[in-house]
């Protein structure tokens, strides 16, 4: 009858070599934390709700800050969302994982629409178009919040291959290093990053214009955080500053 240590060792041997290195580094006991073992795939409910919020915010923008017909991109996002959520519910995670390009297209469309609105807003300011302080503040807030949602979606969809890949342990190399991953003992053993964690990363990056407690590790993560910080800086630095000047 093997003792507990041998049983733990047998369980670790079944994991990929780089996964065992993570466990040995962060958890000397050999007991794999939730983010380093196969778990249940996270449902898309929270992410889907945030997309709905982003669509509503985009529809609330003035026509001058949207690309093409006002309804075009929000309608496209709605169609992609329904197709993605419906396929996961009907076909299950195994088949839904093949539709990852659809999920990335949805997240990319939300981000691209918001980047376009940001650019058009800057052009509006530079051209001297008359806008009231209230219009500038409300529009800037809509763009800023959508920026947070868009990049939270992207981080969630890309980190370690997305929610399905993370659950199946297809890639154990993290693109984002959360405090719970770097400091064993500060969270329960079954902890793993969820959508709300990526929303927090996106929100703090958009307010501090830099990483806070969660560090980007891969180059793509650093590049995307740079882009998000730039959008947030433009929105806060130009739009809100201009609105304050008008108020005074």
Image (cartoon, helix red, strand yellow):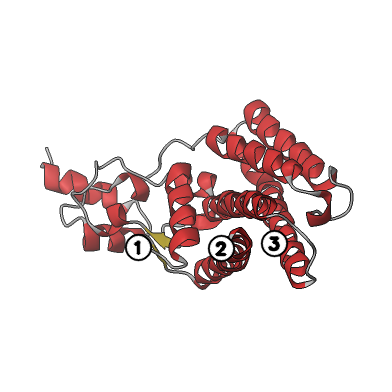
Disc 2 to disc 1, C-alpha distance: 45 Å
Cβ atoms at labels 2 and 3 below 8 Å apart: no
Q: Nearer the viewer, mark 2 or mark 1?
A: 2
Q: Nearer the viewer, mark 2 or mark 3?
A: 2
Question: Between 245 and 165, which is closer to the camera in this rendering?
Answer: 245
Disc 2 to disc 3, C-alpha distance: 11 Å
Residue at point 67%, 51% (across, down) = 139
Q: Residue tagged by mark 3?
A: 118
Residue at point 57%, 40% (across, down) = 47
Residue at point 32%, 43% (across, down) = 191
Residue 236's disc number: 2
Query: Is 198 above or below relative to 239?
Result: above
Residue 164 x, y percent position in the rendering: 53, 44
Q: Nearer the viewer, mark 1 or mark 3?
A: 3
Considering the image in quadrants, where does the C terminus appear? bottom right
Q: Quadrant of residue 114?
A: bottom right
Considering the image in quadrants, where does the N terminus appear? top left
Query: Is 25 above or below relative to 223?
Result: above
Label located before the other in sequence (2 or 3)? 3
Label 3 CA crowd tier, 10 Å (few <14, some 14–19, many 20+) = many
**Dot 1: what SS?**
helix
Residue 160 x, y percent position in the rendering: 49, 56
Question: Between 200 and 240, which is closer to the camera in this rendering?
Answer: 240
Disc 1 to disc 3, C-alpha distance: 44 Å
Residue 41 x, y percent position in the rendering: 49, 37
Question: Between 148 and 31, which is closer to the camera in this rendering?
Answer: 148
């Amino acid at each position: 009858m093997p003792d507990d240590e041998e049983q733990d060792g047998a369980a670790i041997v079944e994991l990929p070599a780089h996964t065992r290195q993570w466990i040995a580094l962060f958890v000397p006991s050999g007991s794999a934390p939730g983010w380093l073992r196969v778990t249940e795939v996270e449902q898309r409910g929270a992410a889907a709700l945030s997309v709905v919020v982003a669509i509503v915010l985009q529809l609330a923008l003035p026509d001058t800050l949207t690309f093409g017909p006002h309804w075009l991109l929000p309608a496209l996002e709605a169609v992609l969302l329904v197709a993605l959520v419906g396929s996961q519910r009907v076909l299950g995670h195994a088949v839904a994982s093949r539709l990852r390009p659809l999920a990335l297209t949805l997240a990319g469309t939300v981000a691209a629409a918001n980047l376009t609105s940001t650019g058009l807003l800057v052009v509006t300011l530079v051209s001297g178009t008359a806008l009231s302080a209230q219009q500038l503040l409300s529009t800037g807030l809509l763009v800023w919040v959508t920026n947070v949602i868009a990049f939270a979606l992207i981080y969630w969809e890309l980190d370690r291959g997305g929610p399905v890949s993370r659950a199946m342990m297809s890639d154990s190399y993290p693109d984002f290093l959360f405090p719970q991953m770097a400091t064993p003992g500060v969270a329960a053993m079954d902890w793993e990053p969820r959508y709300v964690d990526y929303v927090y990363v996106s929100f703090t990056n958009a307010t501090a214009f830099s990483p806070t407690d969660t560090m980007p590790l891969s180059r793509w993560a650093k590049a995307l955080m740079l882009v998000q910080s730039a959008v947030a800086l433009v929105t806060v630095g130009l739009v809100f500053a201009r609105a304050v000047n008008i108020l005074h």
